[in-house]
Amino acid sequence: MVFQIERLEKIKQILTEQKSADVIWLSSYLKVSEVTIRRDLEKLESEGFLKRTYGGAILNNDTAGSSQTGQAQQMQSVVKPVLISDSARDLGEICLTLVEDYDVIFLGRGESNRALAERLYERTGVVVFTNSLMVLQIMEHDRKNKVILTGGEVDYVKKVMSNSSIGIPFPDIRVNKAFLHIQGADLEYGLTVNEQEDAWIYREIKSKSRNMVVIMEGKVFDKIGLIKVDDICGGDYVVTDSSIPEDYKRCFYKNGIRLHQKFDL
């Protein structure tokens, strides 16, 4: 439970860095009700720190004058609070069960990985390598674990650090588990993605990871992306939802792939 004093400080920090935030996102991030968040915003507005808007709040211009400038401010502005769907949270929760205290992991970009990052406060001593600026943002207040950006050039559209496009080698790291999304899964054509950078990341991290955790939303089955990154059974774990077709289940079981899925009750 986050007490009001700590909660108000967190809201102040978020608004100082991001200049705005919405009630739904703050409620999810701080794990309190939307009613509680609205009361907090009302209090901070009475102190002159912010101005409430429909569905959220913006930093008071007088307060904003003392905020960060230059490159640091530019980095903060590229990452804005975003909503995470319930289905992605379900997959993120499954991924959390695969993370142990003091694990060293890699989180690629993707909604379920952001959901996992939100839950890592339930673990201790985890080292997270990531190319996702959103994962970095989510974990910035996590004092129990450590997050390290892979480095490279900032891609302001995809909100990731890009290496392949500018020829910067991927860091020489070793991780216990790598969590990566794919955009297509087909029994014949294998695992595919739609972005060259995602393909490069997959291939680089596979050579450095003890276990590959491939996140497959139900919509990716029988779909083919632009770039093949692996055979259909190229991962060690598959995390998916209840809509996985039976022939894929049989394929994974036959080849020793550990399947973790959400069941609709």
Image (cartoon, rainbow, N blue to C red):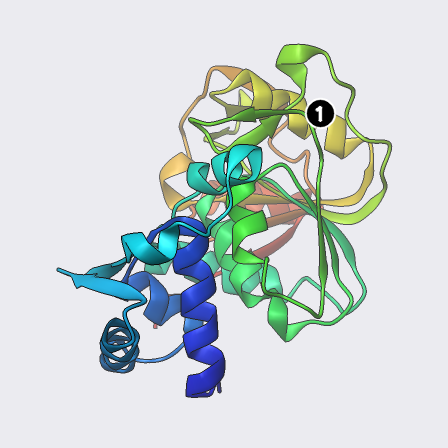
Q: In the picture, residue 255 is in which quadrant?
A: top right
Q: Residues within 10 Å of mark 1 (few under 14, many from 20)?
A: few
Q: Is residue 82 left or right of residue 67?
A: left
Q: Give the secondary structure at mark 1.
A: helix
Q: Is residue 172 left or right of residue 198?
A: right
The image position of residue 40, as x and y in percent, is 30, 78
Residue 74 sits above or below residue 139 on the image: above
Which residue is at a point 62% across and 74% down the rendered structure image?
122
The image position of residue 239, as x and y in percent, is 55, 52
Q: Is residue 153 left or right of residue 25?
A: right
| Count of number-bearing discs | 1
Which residue is at a point 53% across and 33% down the rendered structure image?
70
Q: Residue furthest left?
A: 54
Between 94 and 83, the residue placed more toward the observer is 83
Q: In the picture, residue 101 is in which quadrant?
A: bottom right
Name the residue tied to disc 1: 203
The image position of residue 25, as x and y in percent, is 33, 61
Residue 204 sits above or below residue 118 on the image: above
The image position of residue 63, as x and y in percent, is 36, 58
Asked if residue 84 shows in the view, the reply is no
Quarter of the image for the C terminus: give it: bottom left
Which residue is at a point 30% across and 74% down the rendered structure image?
44
Q: Is residue 128 left or right of residue 232?
A: right
Between 210 and 126, the residue placed more toward the observer is 126
Residue 107 sits above or below residue 46 on the image: above
Disc 1 marks a residue whose amino acid type is Arg
Asked if residue 217 shows in the view, the reply is yes
